[in-house]
Amino acid sequence: MPETTTDQNRPTRRLSEAGVSIWLDDLTRELLAGGLVDLVVNRDVVGVTTNPTIFAAAMAKGTAYDADLAALAGTDVEAAVENLTTDDVRAAADLLRAVYERTGTVDGRVSIEVDPRLARDTDATIATARRLWATVDRPNIFIKIPATVEGLPAITAALAEGISVNVTLIFSIERYRAVMDAFLAGLEQARANGHDLGPIGSVASFFVSRVDTAVDTALEGVGTTDALELRGKAAIANARLAYAAYQDVFSSDRWQALDAAGAQPQRPLWASTGVKNPEYRDTMYVDELVVAGVVNTMPHKTLDAFADHGIVLGDTVTGTADDAAATIAAIEAQGVSMDEVTRTLEDEGVRKFEASWDELLATTKAGLDAAGA
């Protein structure tokens, strides 16, 4: 893979030097054909996340999958989907293998999600995580498991077997703390099982923009001047409180024991960083969440915007917990329950991914039918 350029003034390079790992929230055959390598070189991208929505969109466009669909004609549609998606993730992992090695197994990671229809089924999630890990068969992947109540023991079980995990769909601080506990328990079991902790990676995907979308709608329903002035403030405050919880857990004696055994911390990952409200600065969920040791996964539009005019003024997160808590308290004083908002967002997130999975199955079936006609 080519060496990265030395333009120290570009925003993505400054963000990377501030300790934020830039990942792309997308994967297509076009990216695998050269676009991803270009982003590594010119946009400082060091990882990739995927989800059912991304794969459904990729499959629905163009002819990139026609040859593979023809080869799979007559195959069960769900088996075909797994074959196509694991092939893409494996190829991306191979492209990022040099990054993985250069960063000491920290970055250069590619995520693939467990079937979202299993989000409430612990045993099926564990079984699928094992199968995807073995099928892709690359050390630099993450298996994405949702942070549902049923997903928590699956996270622990996967990590205990040495499977690296991206925990997705985290919205609340309470659930995030449960995720970190599941991570620590998984590594403790992995150590007891004789696994080398060093290569076992994990990130906790804390969703950002969706929180503002939901809270802003509620504040607009209240309609007072005080309520309206709080729009666009919930998501960043919530994420900053999540980082404070991360600092608390990863300074504990329990973590220190795992650190001494060679474990990597479970990094916070800022997800859903594309701005939904056009009135907001298009890079706000990047600019305002800069702190060393985190990941920010961006859709193309956000990455392009940040590369053009992103702002890096140093750490914008550490030491902000009190102000963030005051912001959340002010929002709740307007009658908006963050517990209700985050619970609804989790349920909606699972449903949206299920719908995307159904769309992916339908698109793939149509392709298989056409190829076999």
Image (cartoon, grey):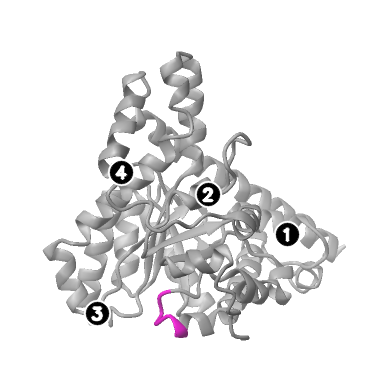
Q: Quadrant of residue 71?
A: bottom right
> Callout 4, which amino acid?
Ile
| Marks 2 and 4, how far apart at CA | 18 Å
Range of magenta residues: 101-106
Which residue is disc 3 drawn over? 262
Q: How many residues crowd around disc 4 within 10 Å: few (fewer than 14), some, or many (20 or more)?
A: many
**Nearest to the observer: residue 23 or residue 309:** 309
Q: Quadrant of residue 88?
A: bottom right
| Camera sees residue 299 | no
Give the residue furthest to the left: 253
Marks 4 and 1 in Cβ contact (< 8 Å): no
Left or right: 54, with 184 as reference point: right
The secondary structure that dominates the magenta segment is: loop
Marks 2 and 4 in Cβ contact (< 8 Å): no
Marks 3 and 2 in Cβ contact (< 8 Å): no
> Callout 1, which amino acid?
Met
Q: Position of residue 119 (x, y in %)?
A: 44, 49
| Camera sees residue 105 | yes
Who comes first in sequence, dot 4 or dot 3? 4
Label 1 or label 2, whichever lies nearer to me, is 2
Left or right: 332, with 286 as reference point: left
